[in-house]
Every structure is written in structure tokens, then in C-alpha cells.
Image (cartoon, rainbow, N blue to C red):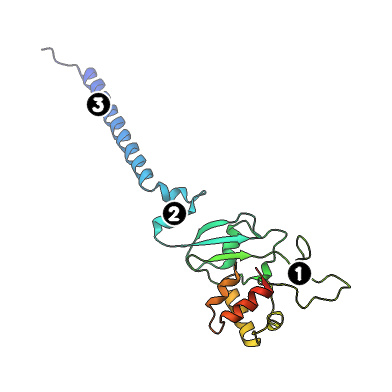
Amino acid sequence: MAQLSRAQLLVYGAIAVAVLLLGARWLGSGAADGGDQAFGAVRSGTGGSSVEVEQDEGGGLVVHVAGEVRSPGVYRLAAGSRVTDAVERAGGVTARGSPDAINLAATLADGQQVVVPAAPDAGGTGGAAVPGATPDPDAPISLGTATVEQLDTIEGIGPVTAADIIEFRDEHGGLSSIDELDELSGIGPATMEALRARLQP
């Protein structure tokens, strides 16, 4: 067999090196693709799917944001988030909303519903006083905006219970149903009936 010349050896050596480099590059890109698949949920969270990120990290809580927000729905937030974070996540308060009616600084709990009520004068009178008119003492009171003084006018509700209702409402970031007040101690069936008759969600 004829011996290879030095030039031929150099050519074959260069080809071998090129093949090795291409093979290493191909293996590296495959590993990178596998890494993307393994951590794809985490990376996608930097865009629009924060739910997958928080699930993979094993933390967070789920809350339902309803009422006068631009994008009502169920959202996953980081543990320790406040009501204001949930409202912002839902697109913020609409022009009809009354953010001052809820405690925006309250800490969220997993499974909590945050309801942003409409302002008393949004979309009609809504129980708000009409200029020049005498307020109707029997007019329904908005649960989302009721004051201690207003609740005190309800039969069976004194100043202490009224303050407890306001505190309970603020701790939960608003209430979507009057029946939720049944969880308060000191409110019996008769009082609940009086509340249902005078309050509106």
C-alpha cells in the first residue's frame, strides 16, 4: 500500500477535527434543547404564564378577583401578597369601582375572593343620596361601603357588632355575599335575617 504524503495526512487530520467539532456542537445543542424542555415552565413564566412558574417553585396562592376590575378572574400570586397586588394583577379598578371600600393593604389568603364594589353613585343611584332629597332610612345599605354608623341602624346590630363586621370585611378584602357574615360570632339567625333585609352585596 502506498504511503500517504504529509499533505494528505494534514487534509485527513483537518477533516477528522471538523467532524469531531460538528459532533460536539450537535450534542451540545441537543442537551440545550433538553434543558429548555426541563425548565420550559420556569422560563415561560417571564412572559405570560406566571402560574407555571409559581407551581414549579412550590409557592404562591390562588385568589379570585371579582367586581369592578378590568379583568376579573382567578390568579396565582406570590405568598405574602396584598389585596392591592391582586387588584393590580386583574388590570386595576374600573372607573365605576370604589377601591377605598376594601382594605387594599390586607394580606391575601389562599382561596380568597377579592371583590371590588361599585361606587355608590355608579350606574344609577345605587342607594346614594340624591341632592335635595331626604335620605330614606329603610333604603338598602351597600355591604361593600357600609360604615359603622349605617350598620348601627340595623335592628340587632350595635356599635361593637358593626365594627366587627367592618373589620371582617376589610380582612377578607371585601365580601361577595351577606351570608359570609354568618361566620362572625354573636350573629344569630334573627340578626342574619335583619342583615339580609337591609344590606345589599
Q: Is residue 188 above or below residue 110?
A: below
Q: Is residue 182 above or below residue 4?
A: below
Tell me the kind of residue under disc 1: Gly
Instruction: Report x, y in % for residue 109.
Output: 49, 69
Which quarter of the picture shows residue 138?
A: bottom right
Residue ranking furthest to the left: 1
Residue ranking furthest to the right: 132
The residue beneath circle 2 is 53
Q: Which mark is residue 16?
A: 3
- Sequence-first disc among 1 and 2: 2
Instruction: Report x, y in % for residue 72.
Output: 60, 56
The mark lying in front, picked from 1 and 3, is 1
Q: Which mark is residue 127?
A: 1
Left or right: 73 as drawn, with respect to 60:
right
- Sequence-first disc among 3 and 2: 3
The mark lying in front, picked from 1 and 2, is 1
Query: Could you tell me which residue is drawn at 60 percent across and 77 percent down?
Result: 192
Query: Could you tell me which residue is drawn at 69 percent across and 62 percent down?
Result: 97
The mark lying in front, picked from 3 and 2, is 2
